[in-house]
Amino acid sequence: MGRLQGRIAWITGAGSGIGEAAAERFAAEGAAVVITGRRRERLEQVAARIGARGGTAHVQPADLMRADQVRAVAGWIGETLGRLDILVNNAGLNITERDWKRLSPAGIDELIGGNLTSAFYVAQAVLPMMRAQGGGVMIHTASMAGRNVSPMSGPGYTAAKHGVVAMSHSINMEECTNNIRSTAFCPGEVNTEILRKRPNPLGQEDLDRMLQPADCADLLLYIATLPPQVTMNEVWLTPTWNRGYVAAQGRKL
C-alpha cells in the first residue's frame, strides 16, 4: 500500500515541472490527485499517464489569478471528494523583461498575481475545508529568491516569493491549533519551463547540473508523509553545483 493511500491532494501548476512531477509521484503512492493549471491539454496528458499506471487524477483547469476560478475548484473538491488532505500550492511564473529598466506595470501585475496573489487565493480557499476536517498539510513552492535578493530572478519575482514564505509561516502561527501544517519550500535552480523566460538561456550542461523536478517531488512527498505532530516550517533544496556559489568563487559560468 502506498504512503498516501486514501489521501486527496490538490496540486497547482501541475501541467509541467515540479507540479507535474509531484502529481505523478503522489499518485504513485496512492493519492487521488486534483491537478490544476491553465492548460487543459497539458493536464490531460499528465492525467493520462497517471491513469495508465493505475493512479487517479482529476483534471480541474483554472486561472489561479482569478479568485472565482480558485473557489470553484476548491468547491468541487469539497463537494465531490469530501476532503482535502494535502495542498501543493505550486503555480508560479516569471517574465523575460524582469529588471527595473524594462519592468512595466503589466509585468508587475503578472509577477505579483502569478506568484503571490494566486498562492493566497488557493490557501484561503482551502483553509475552511481543512479546519472543518481537523487538519491538513500545505506546501507552498517559494524559491531561494524568497530568501535571498539577487538580480537574476528580478525584483518582482523576488518580492513575490518573499511574500509566499511569509504567508506560509503566518498560516502556522494562526492555524497550528487546527492541526494545519504549512511548509515554505524554497528550491534553488530547477530545470523547468520557467527557465525559458531567462534573458540569457542556459546550455544543457547547466540544466543537467540543476535540481530536476523529480528531486523536488521526492522532498514534497517526504513533507506530505510526516506524522501529524511534526511541521517542517521551511526547507531549502539546492543543486550541489550551486551557480551562485560557483560565481562567488570567481569561476566563469
Image: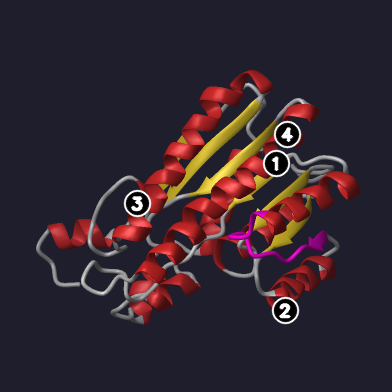
Q: Position of residue 228 (x, y in %)?
A: 67, 25
Q: Which mark is residue 159?
A: 3
Which image quarter holds the N terminus? top right
Q: Residues within 10 Å of mark 4 (few under 14, many from 20)?
A: few
- Pointer 3 with pointer 4, Cβ within 8 A: no
Distance from label 3 to label 4 (Cα)?
27 Å
Q: Of label 2 and label 4, which has the lower sequence position?
A: 2
Q: Residue 196 is drawn in which quadrant?
A: bottom left
Residue under label 1, please give it.
126
Kind of residue indicated by mark 4: Pro
Residue under label 4, please give it.
128
- In the rendered image, the residue lying farthest to the left is 250
Q: Of label 1 and label 2, which has the lower sequence position?
A: 2
Magenta-tinted stretch: 56-67
Q: Position of residue 189 (x, y in %)?
A: 38, 61
Residue under label 2, please give it.
41
Mark in front: 1 vs 2: 1
Kind of residue indicated by mark 2: Glu
Please determine whether, in this image, residue 34 is positioned above or below residue 232.
below
Kind of residue indicated by mark 1: Val
Distance from label 1 to label 2 (Cα)?
25 Å
Based on the picture, tell me whether residue 124 belongs to the magenta stretch.
no
Distance from label 2 to label 3 (Cα)?
31 Å
Q: Residue 152 is drawn in which quadrant?
A: bottom left
Which residue is at a point 21% across and 56% down the rendered structure image? 245
Distance from label 3 to label 1 (Cα)?
24 Å
Applied colour scheme: secondary structure
Please determine whether, in this image, residue 190 is positioned above or below residue 82.
below
Q: Is residue 165 visible?
A: yes
Q: Residues within 10 Å of mark 3 (few under 14, many from 20)?
A: many
